[in-house]
Image: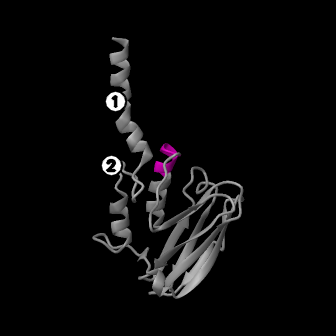
Amino acid sequence: MMKKTLSVLALSALPVLALAAGNHQGGHGMAGHDMQGMHGSMHGGASHSNVGKPGDPAKVDRTIEVVMDDSMRFTPATITVKKGETIRFFVKNAGKVPHEMVVGSLQELKEHAEMMRKMPQMQHAEPNMVTLQPGQRGGLVWQFDQPGTVDFACLIPGHMEAGMVGKIVVE
């Protein structure tokens, strides 16, 4: 009886473990939170947003270096680009803890940050983000197709709340 109970308990935990692991092909694989839906709106889908879309690495207009550090700041914290520009963000983690740069609307970033607080071990990879371990360098390519303001933040639990946010002004 004990062995059967343990087997049932172990099997019932599998969906939770699978959910916590997320979907590493994009999105978190979480019920009730569809990252593809989030990116659909971010990429100019049905609910048009001014955050832009993934850029073509072969058509980069310029590269902008962004440094993240343990003071919970991005340098620079405000970036100005032109409408239609494709930017390669060359991002460096100069800190001693992991950091990430995620591009999106403030509402999307706050929703994602809340999810990260609930599941801090969740790992994910999306075209609008780069997550770096201490000392690592990486990048993301993004096209800004509408004038306005686009936000970016570190969504590792506590980092956004500590002020690790920035703005991209699209002229």
Q: Where is residue 59 in the image (x, y as percent from the top left)?
A: 46, 87
Q: Position of residue 5 (x, y in %)?
A: 34, 17
Observer-nearest residue: 169 or 61? 61
Label 1, label 2: how many angstroms apart (C-alpha)? 20 Å
Q: Does the magenta stretch include residue 112?
A: no
Marks 1,2: beta carbons within 8 A: no
Residue 11 appears in the rendering: yes
Q: Nearer the viewer, residue 20 or 74?
A: 20
In the rendered image, residue 125, in percent from the top left (x then y), is placed at 46, 60
Q: How crowded is mark 2: few (under 14 residues within 10 Å), some or many (20 or more)?
A: few
- Depth check: 109 or 134 in front? 134
Quarter occupied by residue 26 = bottom left
The picture quadrant where one finds residue 24 is bottom left
The numbered mark, 1 or 2, whose residue comes first in the sequence reads: 1
What is the three-letter code of the residue carrying label 1?
Answer: Ser
Identify the image quadrant of the N terminus: top left
| Residue at x 38% of width, y 37% of height | 16
Identify the residue at image location x=56%, y=86%: 62
Picture residue at 44% right of the left edge, 87% below the top: 84
User: Which residue corresponds to mark 2?
Assistant: 32
* Magenta-colored span: 114-120
